[in-house]
Image: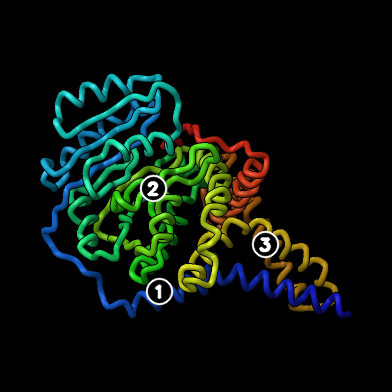
Amino acid sequence: MIMIILFEILLLLLCAAVVNSFFIYPLITYLMSKKNTGRVTVHGFEPTISVLIAAYNEEKVIEERINNLSMLNYDMDKVEVWVGSDKSTDKTNEILLEQKNKFSWLNFYVAESRRGKAGILNDLISKAKNDIIVFTDANTEFHPDVLKNLVEDFVDEKVGGVCGRLVLIDNENSKSEGVEETQYWKYETIIKRAEGKSGIMLSANGGIFAIRKELYKDIPVVNAVTDDLFISLSVIAQNYKFTYREDAIGYEGTGINLTSEYKRKVRFGATNFQTLIYFKKLLSFKNLKIAYAFFSHKVTRWFLPALLISIFLLSWFLSDHVYIIQQFLLIQTAFYLLAFCGFLLSLVKIRITIFSLPYFFIVSNLAIVEGFIKFIKKEHSVIWESTER
């Protein structure tokens, strides 16, 4: 009987952790954001900016990316763009050379050996001469007003980083294969917006964010980390705020299919656990708001597969003893059946949200499991292949 009670308590705690991560924490953060007195900004503030892009075999998008930057609504005499080619083997380097002849603000260098994104960014930061660093990707498209809106928050000396709003766009193939990244991202964007207003934002959107150069810490290149998360947490760890700018907009496509998204999530799964090791001190009681945000929005999500499996097994074990838990087990089973139906429908290129969302959720968590295994076996590498989008 005592064991049954202990298992019931454990089940309740595990469920509370999941509910907190997906519902309670977002609600509390939203309520906190409503009490925010407003940001310190000065319209027309135009500091000098260095835009950094790490590229590997980006011949399909790099020319369009440079042209997109050329159309920004910002004084380009105050901007330098550095593209680091990670020993690209396609036409990326040739295209960059052609573009360099068109735009005086464009600079690029080609690594002599594969460095990985972390290594390339570390190289680029040493070449950047301006105080505000904007990080973006080769496959991101900026709204013309991105830079002027992104940098305004730096008027506040307490702000160390600013995250822009990344909008994901489905392609027709991803729609038919059950890639629900855009729906999940809309939910994440709501949380990021509230975190930014509350001063507890932890992770920037990799395709569109900026920091003060003085706060940059070299990204580890031996054990692979999630670079944008590492940079963001480095700023937070130095007691600076990360804000969120709704009006600094960038666009990216989703993965061309669920397989490509799965591989990307596996890579992030492995590197997220490695990043946690570097910033585990943020879970201490030194800053309760940051610790709560880190635990709720990040750590809980990374250990979600273990939580879900434990909840299901405990529910199954206790279902014969407690009627409510029996019903709860049925609800879980129904959810997993919906996910299985989503898998079957994806095989015939049919996407119905009630099935594809649970399926995408399960696939995402399976990717975390594989990522964790790679992390334990130290198979995650700093050398990366871009996700085709």
Question: Relative to residue 40, is residue 196 drawn left or right?
Answer: right
Q: Position of residue 297 (x, y in %)?
A: 51, 63
Identified at 47% across, 71% down, the residue is 287
The residue depicted at 32 percent of the width and 49 percent of the height is: 208
Q: Closer to the camera, 71 or 51?
A: 51
Q: Position of residue 241 (x, y in %)?
A: 35, 64
Label 3: which residue? 307
Badge 2 or badge 3: first in the primary sequence: 2
**Circles 3 and 1: CB distance less than 8 Å?**
no
Q: Is residue 381 above or below residue 323?
A: above
> Circle 1 — which element?
helix
Q: 199 and 302: which one is in front?
A: 199
Quarter of the picture containing the N terminus is bottom right
**Mark 1 against mark 2, which lies toward the viewer?**
2
Distance between the alpha carbons at the discs numbered 3 and 1: 25 Å
Residue at left offset 32%, top offset 40%? 125
| Disc 1 target residue | 30
Which of these two is toward me, 213 or 187?
213
**Residue 349 seen in the current view:** no
Give the SS element for disc 2. loop
